[in-house]
Image (cartoon, rainbow, N blue to C red):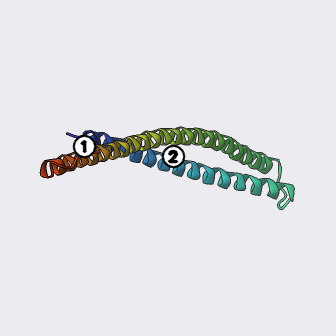
Amino acid sequence: MKRHDRLKPVSRIAGSREEAAARKMAASNDRVARQEQRLTQLEGYLAEYNLGRENGRTVLNAGQLRIHQGFVDTLYKACVGEKIKLNSAVAEHAKMREEWLDAHRRNKALETFIDKSLREERIKRDKHEQKDADALVVLNHPGVRKS
């Protein structure tokens, strides 16, 4: 069995691993996008409530002000929590990207090696065929010498 034929199963496995890593990276990218969207939405709500208070849209008594401030504090804490989740998702995505890059590099290196093996086998076969053709010419024409 030729070298490139022996390497085909290994190549399929490497390709499958690269594809799996690409799917994981895409999923982590989606998680980052969702976290960014949640954070943006919460920050928008927080800005809206803070702006409403600063512009004095409504006159609040002490009880209402306390409730309003509690809500704003809750929104702020939610924003902080979402930032933490976003940072975690970004770090996870970076890890998934590195894993995909590693799998991609390995797969490409294997493909390059297989291509090189095919070229070497082709050159070896061509040389062998040329040698056989030269020997056949010498056999059919005994007066012709190989130079």
Front-most of 115 and 39?
115
Q: Residue furthest right?
A: 55
Identified at 66% across, 42% down, the residue is 83
Label 1, residues with CA under 10 Å away: few <14, some 14-19, many ≥20: few
Q: Is residue 31 above or below residue 48?
A: above
Side of 7 where 54 appears, left or right: right
Residue 128: image x %, image y %? 24, 44
Hey, which quadrant is residue 18 in on the image? top left
Amino acid type, callout 2 = Ser
Q: Residue furthest left?
A: 140
Pair 2/1: label in front: 1
Front-most of 90 and 80?
90
Residue 85: image x %, image y %? 60, 41
Which quarter of the image is occupied by the C terminus? top left
Hey, which quadrant is residue 7 in on the image? top left
Residue 21: image x %, image y %? 43, 43
Q: Is residue 117 above or below residue 59?
A: above
Side of 134 where 53 appears, left or right: right
Label 2, residues with CA under 10 Å away: few <14, some 14-19, many ≥20: many
Which residue was labeled with disc 1? 5
Q: Which mark is residue 28?
A: 2
Rounded to the nearest angstrom, the CA distance separating label 2 from label 1 is 36 Å
Amino acid type, callout 1 = Asp
Identified at 81% across, 57% down, the residue is 51
